[in-house]
Image (cartoon, rainbow, N blue to C red):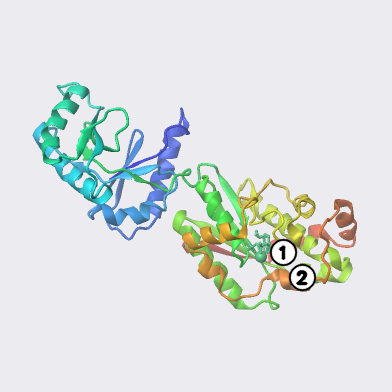
Amino acid sequence: MAGRYPETGLQGGHRGFYERRLCENRGAARPGVPELRNERIRGRVLVRAGVTAERLLEPVSRVFGVASLSPAVEVEADLDQIAAAGRVELRQALSLQFAGREAVRFRVKVNRADKGFPKRSNQIERELAEAVMPEFPALQVNLGSPELSLEVDLRQEGPWVFARRIPGPGGLPVGVMGRVVCLLSGGIDSPVAAWLAMKRGMRVDFVSFYSFPHVGPQLREKLIRQVENLNRWQPTAKLTIVPFTPIQEAIRDSCPPSYRTVLYRRAMQRIASKIAFRSNAKALITGESVGQVASQTLENMTVIEAASALPVLRPLVTMDKLETIALARRIGSYETSNLPAPDCCTVFQPDHPVIYGILEEALAAEQGLDLAAMTAEAVRGSERLRFPE
Ligand code: ATP
Ligand code: MG
């Protein structure tokens, strides 16, 4: 099977790097397929496996950076053999993708990377079309806008013949854009935000704030499950679970109640930035969306992100809750998010949280706190988990 990735983003010296990442990530998709081997070929990644291509489709759909994939057969560099393989592939493509159609726009496309092959590409294309078309009366040659192409890659290592192109998940290979840290709660939004960050090539580590004993051990289990689920799209991750109760108590005891939620969030961003620095992560990811809850007005988001030392990316910023839920279902995070387990922000929640926070007021409210010591203590007391263990 050949996996294709979009050419446009892959110019110059980045290309080899992208390809290597793609191959590593593909291995990490843990498809449960033994003897999976990857080879990089310019513009493509060849996956050889002792199983049918169909069994690879699902695992490969979790490898970001793959634009499309094609089950391909390897043949000898001989036109009769190529034509025979082509008929098999066409039969399958027609029955799977064009069943019942009387006319299908068609062409043969030969990519003669191996210039040692004696004939020119367009001559081979013509000869192959003549050899395969009589068996399939629906095929009508249309070089300009074919719906179905029988493609032949003539390369030293091949040649390969294929007729199907199945869309891949798109995006960029996880890791090519560096590391980020996602603030992962037990809710619906942050796992989806993490997934979208992965889709754009970011390798995601996780930080969760845990108000033990106000919230029980179910939350810890839930977070672990969620990271395992999300890691189906990336090879490894770290989860740092930060003890949050002392900070919440300090804020409760010495700050105006209306600012509690905003100050909790500021503390989270401060601590997450510290943790991010240690693994050279370049941004924080949150599941915030404008206007979704009281703490997510533009004013409060501004006051909260002022505590971060890194850019705060919010992949869901303009999404409606229903759109997020639909995506959460698709990536399998919704079920886990829905497991009952209270989250830290319900602890000591005020009756009237501030909606249009003001940075100066937040800074004044924090005057009585030893922020540096609280942050250092929280980082020191954190539990660090690695996935896979
Ligand atoms: P989510 O469903 O992700 O919890 P939400 O809509 O419930 O989002 P909030 O609870 O206001 O929104 O949280 C906003 C963001 O702050 C979350 O998406 C998450 O990134 C971060 N966050 C909130 N609580 C925690 C927590 N206990 N640990 C880590 N991050 C958190
Ligand atoms: Mg939440």
Task: Answer with mark 2 or mark 1, whichever residue precedes in sequence.
Answer: 2
- The residue that label 2 is drawn on is 246
Q: Is residue 188 left or right of residue 249?
A: left
- Judged from the image, the secondary structure of the residue bearing numbered disc 2 is helix
Find ligand 1 in the image and state its quadrant.
bottom right
Residue 144 numbered mark, or none: none
Rendering coords of residue 122 (x, y %): 21, 23
Residue 378's disc is 1
Q: Residue at x 73, y 50 (%)?
A: 308
Residue toward you, 7 or 327: 327
Q: Residue furthest front?
A: 102
Residue 284 image position (x, y, % from top left): 65, 51
Q: Amino acid at mark 2?
A: Pro
**Residue 235 appears anywhere in the view:** no
Q: Which quadrant holds the N terminus?
A: top left
- Residue 297 screen position, x and y as percent: 76, 55
Neighbourhood count class around disc 2 (C-alpha, 10 Å): few under 14, some 14–19, many 20 upward: some
